[in-house]
Image (cartoon, rainbow, N blue to C red):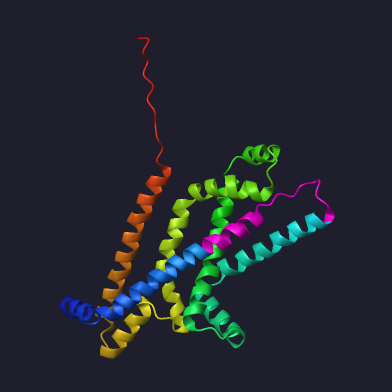
Amino acid sequence: MKIDFQYAWSQLINNWPLFWYGIKMTIAFAVVGTLAGLIIGLIIGAIRCVPLDPLDKPVTRFFKRLGRFITGFYVWVFRGTPMMVQAVFLYYLFKPVLHWNNFTAGMVIISVNTAAYMAEIIRSGIQSIDPGQMEAAKSLGMTNTQTMISIIFPQAIKNTFPSLGNQFIVNIKDSCMLNAISVVELFFQAQSVAGTNMRYIEVYLVVAILYLILTTVATFVLNYVEKKINKTNTVTIKDNCA
């Protein structure tokens, strides 16, 4: 089937306010979902990495194992099921209790879904750090919480930044899954425009290009930030004795 590129361009121009609103909402869901997911993921990742000390009291060891089990179950469920299914299930499950709207539900769902992936990313980042740093911090009298916040987390985030950035890219694309609960974002707007004029190919071509532009720009920004994070200052020492 022939694609009318001129018609696709006209659809972009004529419906730009709708597309622009969808773009802003898509970015909002991606940003909030990634940041909130990172915060929740840090907590879950830390719980999953809490060491079991042989000197722990039975009660302490019980709660550590319980925390590992709950967080492990959380990660297993949210990584093992599609976000679209999670969105529909959680939205209608809690709507009678929370009385939330589509926008609020969408923000919560994309955040808790992202947190499951972030938790595994953070866990791998924590495990990549030399255990000697934890032991050194304990020898200085620091608690596990202080060590995690001041020493472990900053390094873990730096080591896993490419994976964290990749999750942001994924959220830009996967926000369209929230269309299942009628959340207004870019894909939702595309469906509205395509359904109005019954020209699906041209409209979805426009939307595909818009998504590609968003992910490309985000990739360049994340690569720039990564270079800044990994940039180290070098000092050249001249030998004046020669």
- Residue 60: percent from the left, percent from the top? 79, 55
Residue 94 against residue 155 in the figure, above or below: below
- Total label count? 0
- Residue 113: percent from the left, percent from the top? 54, 69
Position of the N terminus, as image quadrant, is: bottom left
Residue located 82% across and 57% down the image: 59
* The residue positioned farthest toward the left in the image shown: 6
Q: Is residue 46 left or right of residue 157?
A: right
Q: Is residue 34 left or right of residue 89?
A: left
Residue located 28% across and 69% down the image: 209
- Residue 84: percent from the left, percent from the top? 50, 77
Q: Which residue range is magenta in the image?
A: 37-58
* The residue positioned farthest toward the right in the image shown: 58
Position of the C terminus, as image quadrant, is: top left
Residue 44 magenta = yes
Q: Is residue 11 left or right of residue 130?
A: left
Q: Nearer the viewer, residue 68 or 230?
A: 230
- Residue 13: percent from the left, percent from the top? 20, 78
Residue 168 magenta = no
* The residue positioned farthest toward the top in the image shown: 242
Residue located 74% across and 50% down the image: 52
Q: Nearer the viewer, residue 79 or 26?
A: 26
Residue 135 sits in which quadrant? top right
Residue located 60% across and 88% down the image: 96
Residue 53 against residue 217 in the figure, above or below: above
Q: Nearer the viewer, residue 125 or 31?
A: 31
